[in-house]
Amino acid sequence: MKKIVLLMLLLGVVVYGSTGEEIAKKSDCLHCHAMDKRSIAPAFLGIARHNIRLNPKDPRSKMIHVIKYGSHGEYRHYKSKTMPPHPNLSDKEINTLVSWILDSYKDYMAHNQ
């Protein structure tokens, strides 16, 4: 019984203690996105910059919506690309992922000005 309780606690730490980077790795984010390089999808830093410019007071809402429900043609260089929805990610995971992307952009800007 003690082993089962310990295992459940450890699994809780893994699921609920995930960082944005871990969530990006375990989901399919990194198949299309990179932190600072464009590939078949915009770089995370570009996504953060784009959403901060569009809505400086609340860049998170659009990002959350796109991750959860998907989008098509949101970015100039990716007009023909579709971002698939990610219903398998919980709201907490999506919020953690968005925080990681925005915080990474802020860190990048702080060190590259």
Image (spheres, rainbow, N blue to C red):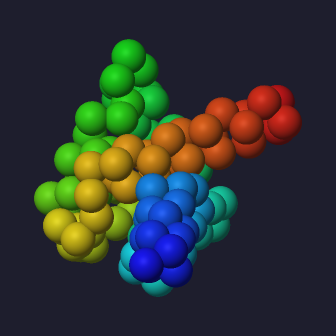
Q: Which residue lies furthest to the front in this view?
A: 1
Determine whether 7 is above or below 105 in the image.
Answer: below
On the image, which quarter does residue 22 sit in? bottom right
Instruction: Name the residue rendered at 50%, 41% in the picture.
Output: 99
In this rendering, the answer to whether 94 lies above or below 85 is above
Nearest to the observer: residue 77 or residue 44: 44
Question: Could you tell me residue 71's position as x and y percent?
Answer: 19, 60
Is residue 64 shown above or below 60? below
Residue 1 in view here:
yes
Q: Is residue 50 left or right of residue 21?
A: left
Q: In which quarter of the image is the N terminus?
A: bottom left
Q: Quadrant of residue 89?
A: bottom left
The percent coordinates of residue 35 (x first, y second) are 62, 61
Residue at the (38%, 31%) spot, across then down:
59
Q: Is residue 32 visible?
A: no
Q: Where is residue 17 in the image (x, y as percent from the top left)?
A: 53, 56
Residue at left 44%, top 40%? Answer: 50
Label count reads 0
Residue 6 x/y as whole percent = 53, 71
